[in-house]
Image (tube, rainbow, N blue to C red):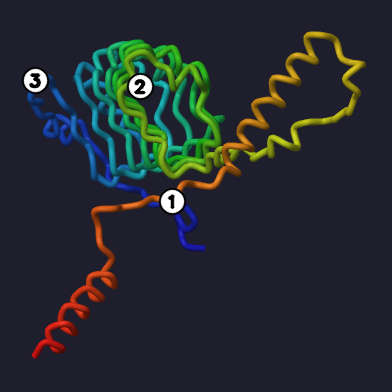
Amino acid sequence: MAKGKGKGPKGKKITLKTAKNSIRISFDGGRRLDLSKMGITTFPKCILKLADVDELDLSRNMLKKIPNSIEKFQKLRWLDLHSNQLEELPKTVGTLQNLFYLNICNNKLNSKTLPEELNLLKNLRILNLGLNCLDNIPSTLGALKELKELGLFDNFLTTIPKSVKTLPRLQKLNAERNPFPEPKKEEYIDPIKRVESLYLVQEKDLCCSCLKTCQEERGKLSKLKNTMSCPSKKLSFPLLLTPNSTAMDNQEQWRLKDEHL
């Protein structure tokens, strides 16, 4: 067997020099370490020496795991890990208290490998969990009171916890293309069928109040019946002539003229 056969791709090795050259200044003056689309398969340990950056972009690589040492990036406000092959996230991600943007979309995370420690990110504004393998969302995410945008699209969710849907600052929730059950349609029930039993009694068996009510209802029914059975009056239009009557008058005038000629 050839050496190395059966192993995954080695990927590009990132040196400290390469990482330093990948630092950019963001629009608000922060330092951004951009290692996206670099073909990285293993988290480069050398970047731990650059842990004072404000933003870290490792998106569009082939990473399967993020180490616990991610906790060293305490200044991070922006962490982009989308479009990798991540199967789990470390619990230490919950220590990044300054984080306001976290994108882990398009990975292989499931509900068991999504750490509950995400609920510790009290300053998080944007969280993207779309395009993963999640079949449920922990209700503890309801602790993210500052969250404004939440992406849950293209997962296997059948429900979203109320604590998440009612987050006080949530403005955008994208949960499209999940197998949510269709809302049940209300079954139509015939009002007549709602009457379980009907009893016929004689007037002498009714109390005064019930007898009076029945008589009033019977009177209303009789009045309505008489109104509907009354033939409608024939409408007359004395000032209008029918076409046939006009034609007959004209014919009579012409006949008289012919006789005098």
Amino acid on which disc 1 is placed: Lys
Amino acid on which disc 3 is placed: Asp
Tell which of 107 and 169 is nearer to you.
Answer: 169
Tell which of 115 and 58 is nearer to you.
Answer: 115
Total count of labels: 3
Tell which of 44 and 162 is nearer to you.
Answer: 162
| Rendered-image quadrant of the C terminus | bottom left
Label 2: element kind = helix
| Label 3, residues with CA under 10 Å away: few <14, some 14-19, many ≥20 | few
Where is mark 3, residue-wise?
28
Residue reaching furthest to the front: 260
Q: Earlier in the sequence, mark 1 or mark 2?
A: 2
Which quadrant of the figure has residue 85? Answer: top left
Q: CA distance from mark 1 to mark 2?
A: 93 Å
Across and down, in percent, residue 163 comes to: 48, 17
Residue 200, relative to residue 121: is it above or below?
below
Q: Earlier in the sequence, mark 3 or mark 1?
A: 3
Residue contact between numbered discs 1 and 2, judged by CB atoms under 8 Å: no
Left or right: 247 as drawn, with respect to 114: left
Where is mark 1, residue-wise?
234
Residue at position x 49%, y 23% from top? 115
Which label sits in the foreground, 3 or 1?
A: 1
Which label sits in the foreground, 1 or 2?
A: 1
| Label 2, residues with CA under 10 Å away: few <14, some 14-19, many ≥20 | many
Residue 70's disc is 2
Left or right: 91 as drawn, with respect to 106: right
Across and down, in percent, residue 117 comes to: 46, 16
Across and down, in percent, residue 49 comes to: 24, 21
Q: CA distance from mark 3 to mark 1?
A: 86 Å
Amino acid on which disc 2 is placed: Ile
Left or right: 207 as drawn, with respect to 142: right
Residue at position x 80%, y 15% from top? 211
